[in-house]
Image (cartoon, rainbow, N blue to C red):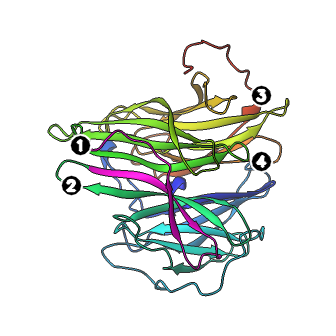
Amino acid sequence: MAPNNGGIWSWGEEILVMYINGPHKNGTGCGSHSTQEGVPSATYDTSRSLDGGLTWGEHRVAFKRYVASTGWPEPKPVRLTKPLDFRNRNTIVHFQRDDTGLTYLYASTDRGRTWRGPYDNIPRFLNGVDGRTMYEVTGPRSLTAHMQAATANTDACARYDSYAVQTADGGLTWTLGPKISVLPECGTGWKVEWATHPSVARVDANTLITSFRSGHQQEQTRTRTGWFGVTRSTDNGKTWAHLIQLGESPGNNSCPNSTVVVPLSNGRKRVVTRIWLRPPDKQYCEKSKLLARFSDDHGDTWSDTITLREDVFGWDTGYPIATMRDDGKVVVIYWLKTVNQDEPNQIGATIWEAARVVTPAPGSPGRK
């Protein structure tokens, strides 16, 4: 389950995706994950495609998942002492959180066939950072990862924002960079507020757009509302501003989204965000939907919602992550069920020619 927590990497037609693999449990109903990700046997696994996502093979365990009740499995975290070369096409990294506010680094120099780590070089920033594998390589020794962080924990408000976390020496040392999410002031009637699971896409040398799993929870009734928030930076990530709310995800069901940039035939760039809309409450076993919206003007206006898949069963599904092939087609990977809650989760993929969709006329429904 949860490819959004694992990661995705691509080299032309070769795609590697990472996801959590745990034992299945029947009888959980619609309100709980049927994959047991918090048990000692849970692992991060990978699958590889060599034909652009049409077929998948080379399924293997990357490493064991951290479990709070039993601590770190072997190997235990150690210090990275030799800098990584991020511009080496075969080098990729993964970030694993331990749910106590620390995030650890794994590295592979053979496109994910073998992994080294965990490395404990990343400090405990703010009230703790929870890293998932979303990052941009900016130089041979420099990389910017995008992570959620606990920024407030008071009687009035618990808050989770997203930040850039950066290294300039191949992963040996890390610094806390700019905040990339934008939320209302803390403590305005909502006990919990969050803008997490950032998915960052670069449009040009100065413009970046990030989508989030956003939401808040009322203190007295514990009512939760989720939405898909978007921010933009026009100064290469130094400052960020709220851009748009791309629809709501009502009830206790907000899900991460995934954003990429695809080239158009006229030389412009299209920002594409995939949204997973679950049933309005965990107790309803309705169909889930994989949706998409896109922008051709750096996020100023957005298309109507496009349905990519609507045959998926129930709440226990989603967490998409996407990459773009050399031919411009988008490959989005997620976990799903199609029959009932007691069906084991599958990892599925949708391949979409996002660049061929006609842009709606200005002022049409669904645009900003």
Q: Position of residue 274 (x, y in %)?
A: 58, 38
User: Mark 3: which amino acid?
Assistant: Arg
In this rendering, the label closer to the viewer, 2 or 4: 2
Compared to 248, does 147 lie above or below?
A: below
User: Mark 4: which amino acid?
Assistant: Arg
> Considering the numbered disc 3 on the image, is that residue within a helix, a strand or a loop?
helix
Which label is found at residue 325? 4
- Left or right side of 337 for 292: right
User: Do tag 1 and tag 2 residues touch (Cβ < 8 Å)?
Assistant: yes
Which label is found at residue 154? 2
Who comes first in sequence, dot 1 or dot 2? 2
Name the quadrant containing residue 71. Answer: bottom left
Q: CA distance from mark 2 to mark 4?
A: 45 Å
> Considering the numbered disc 4 on the image, is that residue within a helix, a strand or a loop?
loop
> Considering the numbered disc 1 on the image, is that residue within a helix, a strand or a loop?
loop
The part of the chain drawn in magenta is: 158-187
Who comes first in sequence, dot 2 or dot 3? 2
User: Do tag 2 and tag 4 residues touch (Cβ < 8 Å)?
Assistant: no
User: Do tag 1 and tag 3 residues touch (Cβ < 8 Å)?
Assistant: no
Residue at the extreme left of the image, as rendered: 220
Observer-nearest residue: 144 or 198? Answer: 144
Q: CA distance from mark 1 to mark 2?
A: 9 Å
**Pointer 1 residue:** 187
Q: Position of residue 367 (x, y in %)?
A: 57, 20
Q: CA distance from mark 4 to mark 3?
A: 14 Å
Compared to 358, does 250 lie above or below?
A: below
Compared to 300, does 216 lie above or below?
A: below
Who comes first in sequence, dot 2 or dot 4? 2
Which label is found at residue 259? none
User: Mark 1: which amino acid?
Assistant: Gly
Q: Work out whether residue 220 can be spotted.
A: yes
> Considering the numbered disc 2 on the image, is that residue within a helix, a strand or a loop?
loop
